[in-house]
Amino acid sequence: MTTAFCVFAKTAVRQRRIPFEISAESDPFYSAANMAKLRKSIAQMEETVGIVHTVNLDD
């Protein structure tokens, strides 16, 4: 672990940037289809005043 961090730190200093790309695009949570589904769910909750249902996992 120490060696990996040292390699990362030296590369970051030498290149003056993080040596890898950080992106949320590959996360399926942020896909267009899921975001549309979330917006629809939020709209339904706002229309119905948000009835909360609980799930009992002990059954």
Image: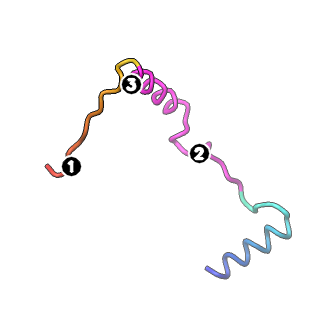
Which label sits on residue 11?
Answer: none
- Residue at 21% of width from left, 49% of height from top? 57
Mark 1: amino acid: Leu
Residue at left offset 49%, top offset 33%: 34
| Magenta segment includes 28 | yes
Residue 27: give x, y in percent of width and height.
Answer: 55, 45
Q: Which element is circle 2 on?
A: loop
Query: Rounded to the nearest whole Å, what is the CA distance between mark 1 and mark 2?
Result: 31 Å
- Residue under the image location 68 percent in, 53 percent down: 22
Instruction: Report if the CB atoms under discs 2 and 3 are less than 8 Å apart.
Output: no
Which element type, helix, strand or loop, lies under badge 3? helix
| Quarter assignment of residue 14 | bottom right
Q: Which mark is residue 26?
A: 2
Disc 3 target residue:
45
Side of 25 relative to 17 (left or right): left
- Which of the two labelled residues, at mark 1 and mark 3, occupies the earlier sequence position? 3
Which image quadrant is residue 13 in?
bottom right
Is 39 magenta? The answer is: yes
Q: Give the residues in magenta.
A: 21-46
Q: Which mark is residue 57?
A: 1
Question: In the rendered view, would you say 22 is above or below 43?
Answer: below
Main SS of residues in magenta: helix
Mark 1 closeness class: few <14, some 14–19, many ≥20 residues within 10 Å: few
Q: Amino acid at mark 3?
A: Met
- Dot 3 alpha-carbon crowd within 10 angstroms: few under 14, some 14 to 19, many 20 or more: few
Which mark is in front, 1 or 3? 3
**Residue kind at label 2, given as amino acid type:** Ser
